[in-house]
Image: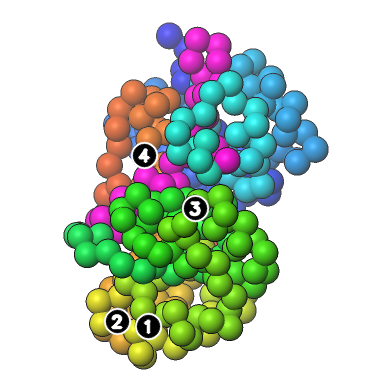
Amino acid sequence: MSRRKACVIGWPIAHSRSPLIHRYWLKRLAVDGDYTAVAVEPERIAKFFIQFADSGFIGGNVTVPHKEAAFRAVDEADEVAAVLGAVNTLWLQDGRLLGSNTDVHGFLANLDGAVPGWSAEVGAAMVLGAGGAARAVIWSLLQRGFDPVVVVNRTLAKAEQLARNFGPGVRASGWDEVGTMLPLSRVLVNTTSLGMRGQPSLPLDLRRVRDDMIVNDLVYVPLETGLLERARDCGLSAVDGLGMLLHQAVPGFEKWFGQRPEVSDELRSLIVADLARDA
């Protein structure tokens, strides 16, 4: 049997930690396989997916800006990918290119591990941003029963479009309404780049929110963002975004290599150390 190979596809791609994650699991589980990064320019991506069956890869992950192109390219997408209109995990089966979106799994598994029972008590939730990650987060929160899910975006029209797509459980809001809506929210999730290294900060006042609020920042560079630091200072549950990155990788590895890996403290420490080298 030939050596199985998978990849991560994006543009740019040098920053991706996916090869480090999957190669760790390959070694840990003694799987004869490999996982590499493939940079594909946007103008070449459609042809790349058409020729994927001849690429030598059995599957791969898809990162920005190609997730929607991957959705259009697959022969079949699973339910979650169809709802989100984006694919981040590909695999070949009987010559057909199939696709899934594991961001929902990653988001929920991260919170389930960090704050066990976090969704036992639901209520309102607030999602900052209206991009691809926001779609996965909104769907996840709706599946766990949160209502309403308030989507806040600088361009209100994008938030309104998401609200229309997801239905009556989702409401759109501008940044000017955050101060009013935030104290009512049980969960706050930042899906924007605000607070990322090199980006503007996210100036939210968390002093008047619910004392059981859970704050999740999908940014993981830096790992401890200003938002999470303020959340901890206020005694709130604060969850970083690295766990989502690690957990979303699990289903793909299992599809390609036939074993289900674990997100361990050792793996997390490995990625944290790698991030620190780039600081």
> Which of these two is toward me, 182 or 269?
182
Q: Are marks 3 and 4 in contact (CB under 8 Å)?
A: no
Marks 3 and 4: which is nearer the front?
A: 3
Q: Which mark is residue 250?
A: 4
Q: Amino acid at mark 2?
A: Arg
Which element is circle 4 on? Answer: helix
Instruction: Specify the segment rendered in magenta.
Output: 85-114
Q: Residue type at mark 3: give it.
A: Gly
User: Residue extending furthest front?
Assistant: 168
The residue shown at (25%, 60%) is 119
Q: Is residue 245 visible?
A: no
Tell me if label 1 and label 2 are in contact, CB under 8 Å: yes
Q: CA distance from mark 4 to mark 1?
A: 35 Å
Whether tag 4 and tag 2 are in contact, CB under 8 A, the answer is no
Q: Tell me the tag on residue 210.
A: 2
- Quadrant hosting residue 85: top right
Residue 235 location (% of width, % of height): 26, 83
The spot of residue 78 in percent (x, y) is 46, 30
Q: Is residue 96 magenta?
A: yes
Name the residue located 54 percent from the left edge and 23 percent from the top edge: 76
- The span from disc 2 to disc 3 (Cα, nearest Å) is 26 Å
Where is residue 193 drawn, in percent x and y?
Answer: 58, 67
Q: Does dot 2 land on a helix, a strand or a loop?
A: loop
